[in-house]
Image (cartoon, coloured by chain):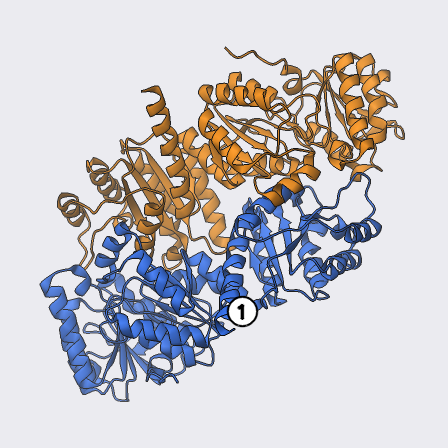
Chain colours: A orange, B blue
Amino acid sequence: MLKTPDLEHIFHPRSVAVVGGSRELIGMASYFIEELINGNFKGEIYPVNRNKTEVMGLKSYKNIRDIPGPVDYVIVAIPAKYVPALMRDCAAKKVKACSIFTAGFGELGTDEGRRLEQEIAETAKEGGVRVIGPNCMGVYCPSSGLCLGTNLPRRSGHLGLVLQSGGNAIYLSRVAPMRGAPISKAVSYGNACDVDESDLLEYFAQDDETRVIGAYIEGVKDGRRFRESLTKVAQAKPTILIKGGRTKAGAATAASHTGSLAGSMSAWASLARQAGVVQVNSMDELIDLALLFLYMSPPKGRRVAMVGVGGGLSVLASDIFSLEHLWLPQLSDAVKNQLQELTPSVGHIYTNPVDTTAMFFGADTLTKSIKAIDAWDEIDMLALQLGYDFLDAYPLSIRETLVDSMVEAVKAVSKPSLMILHCVFSPEAYQTYFRDQQTCWEAGLPAFPSLQRAARALNRFISYHEEKASSSA
Amino acid sequence: MLKTPDLEHIFHPRSVAVVGGSRELIGMASYFIEELINGNFKGEIYPVNRNKTEVMGLKSYKNIRDIPGPVDYVIVAIPAKYVPALMRDCAAKKVKACSIFTAGFGELGTDEGRRLEQEIAETAKEGGVRVIGPNCMGVYCPSSGLCLGTNLPRRSGHLGLVLQSGGNAIYLSRVAPMRGAPISKAVSYGNACDVDESDLLEYFAQDDETRVIGAYIEGVKDGRRFRESLTKVAQAKPTILIKGGRTKAGAATAASHTGSLAGSMSAWASLARQAGVVQVNSMDELIDLALLFLYMSPPKGRRVAMVGVGGGLSVLASDIFSLEHLWLPQLSDAVKNQLQELTPSVGHIYTNPVDTTAMFFGADTLTKSIKAIDAWDEIDMLALQLGYDFLDAYPLSIRETLVDSMVEAVKAVSKPSLMILHCVFSPEAYQTYFRDQQTCWEAGLPAFPSLQRAARALNRFISYHEEKASSSA
């Protein structure tokens, strides 16, 4: 049984103080305040600033201890040398938690940096203040209106993110929702002087809002605890891991980025395998996997029927899927005949991938064609594909309804299905692409931007379920 | 010495006849005619159609033999069964070459399909007519106004393409120019009943417009000639190859796609290696490589300095580049100190990748910073990077000039350089992205859409030059 870490104040504070002036750190404090206002944060917002009496229409205080009401959470964006004193003020004010944006601590690799970081950790601990960071972007929680000081989607979802890096936190929090995986909570935790990856993973394991967990970790300080946490968490929910600093060069960068000892590549791969965690190499791969966990039920095998337009891709599609251990069986004569009857076309050869003209015959014919393929018992899943390069030759009226027809047709399908929207080549095509992508995930169909990305994610998704089945057998 | 294949009529015909009715094959004939008009084809255009006397304002003929003037080139878009008779008419009319869009020949795998294909090949040969196809899109040659029946860029460039698949021809002809690699000539040659991959490769090897050659090949009929051609061609110009149907499943699809015998994966890999050809797996990789060959001089080694904004990516950047055998050395103290002096920033750590704030200090400071990095003798090339996700927090005035400043700064650089424009996440960001991408290649800087794509292409580009150097040593 997982212990619920006492981190609720971090995600649902009743009030937030933002400490920092606009003259320091490129004025990050004002970004944090602006985004709390824009994000409809329901509690009190208190600017704390030595030089101003008002910030963005809010009364500003010289010291956190001057604030009249209780302060649950503090966002810290002042130079490093002032942070220890602020921690003492936070303890005096009985602040529950804070996140420290400021850099210039342990990650500097200097004695002074390490000493400062240790001092804030100890002061906070004595005063009962939980600390996220330093050297981090903090907390994004759309349901309570917390954000990372940058303009992020307001919509709440089911992907929980534990991220050592602020840049990754911003990228994932911005891009995953556009692909159909809005965030439940994301935490950029930087140097982890108090709250660490294990605390956060365990929180997400029991968080009702979170169905899938993604983590970007450069290094851990307590390896034994991390191994235990990761194993428990991965049993509770699908967990996807990016290990930053896996290579020698990456590890050297990680040391100066968040002061992490990175550990060897093989050690992490073996840890991930034993814990039942899916390890990926990039943020986009993390999102790809999350989409499958959120939207697709596990296929019974690795046989794929691919259906769509863009015949030139068909041979490469077979190659690309084969390289990820996914098979496109040759169409049976029965299915071929059914497709020929539905869309008679001189000289057209029906193969798998099915280069179907059915979608130009209207939604009804397309639905019948796709149902015929779905009923074919030699496949385990359907991959629909649409190449935007190919569409330029067709009238706008056809282009604009193609994905609608495909999504409508997939509703009649019984097997796990996904969409590949690819070969997007111009700003105009991207307009359609983003709308079509949203149409897909609103209908529960995960969409991928290339054959490679879809195949790679599918391979890992199926392996995850295969291993889960064999370990429980 | 390469023999110049007699294919000039294919690319520079004085007149073109387009044979086909709007009721057959989804009216492809009318697309071909429309695009010849739009592409400003300078010679005569003759529609040939049993049912009409005028097509798009042009006089239409019932038979190709009724056309009064000479006909150099014929585009064929009539059902397969009528093609042999048309070939006899073409021979009688002394047509120089034709491309046959029509499918339904050898690729069907039927005796009838093979017999028809053989008949057109023999008739054409006897009559002195060169044939491209059947089952192909034909010829795209922007300098003469020929296109593939679909709306392609009019601008001519230096990438020559030999493509068995029509879908790939359209994708590459549309996308490569947007990335800075406009096409000299592209030929989709389908079943290759007469003009084949070897003819076309040899033509491109001596074609003055073509500096880099890309090929997509599913299978060849004359393996010995192909090996000889490929070797000679790769000695003349950088040649990039995609082998379609490398896997067992892909080969099965290739057989029905263009009637090709695909050959084993290892046989093709060894052929490519011996011939000095760069083998890639996808069309986007082909474009990535072509950009390096067109724009970048070969680096002296594999050490990279990366400079840009988006700190969270830095650790992953080192990892991703290391996995492609590219090294990001740690910054020397001298370079660190120079950067610190140029852009003093409390708590900022200068590492490689260099997360520089210099670009927010104006073009002059950025140029000085980049010059300092360029002068560092432990690196062989510069990779500039800009993450669009990160930019959302900045005012439009900064966002819109960032790439301009970066491109301006790179002009002072002596080492080979490239740009990575990535983390694009919205239709709006793509507007900026496409403009920025064009700014880059117009300034001679190749741009890549992800760290992975840049690293992968660089690795192959450098390997190509390493192997060339060692084989000539």
Q: Subunit of mark 1?
A: B
Q: Is residue A11 left or right of residue B179?
A: right
Q: Is residue A49 above or below residue B47?
A: above
Label 1 neighbour load within 10 Å: few <14, some 14-19, many 20+: some
Residue closest to the eye, A409 or A71: A71
Q: Which image quadrant: the C terminus of chain A?
A: top left
Q: Residue furthest left?
A: B111
Q: Position of residue A291 (x, y in %)?
A: 44, 34
Regarding mark 1 in the picture, which secondary structure is present there? helix
Residue closest to the eye, A285 or A307: A285
Answer with the quarter of the image where residue B389 lies.
top right
Q: Residue furthest right?
A: A51
Q: Is residue B125 visible?
A: yes
Q: Residue furthest front?
A: B473
- According to the image, label 1 marks what residue? B294
Q: Position of residue B350 (x, y in %)?
A: 74, 46
Q: Is residue B68 above or below residue B132?
A: below
Q: Is residue A226 above or below residue A23?
A: above
Answer with the quarter of the image where residue A172 lies.
top right
Total numbered badges shown on the rendered structure? 1
Answer with the quarter of the image where residue A169 lies.
top right
Q: Inspect the image, locate mark 1, and give the three-letter code of the amino acid beneath it.
A: Leu
Q: Position of residue B99 (x, y in %)?
A: 27, 74
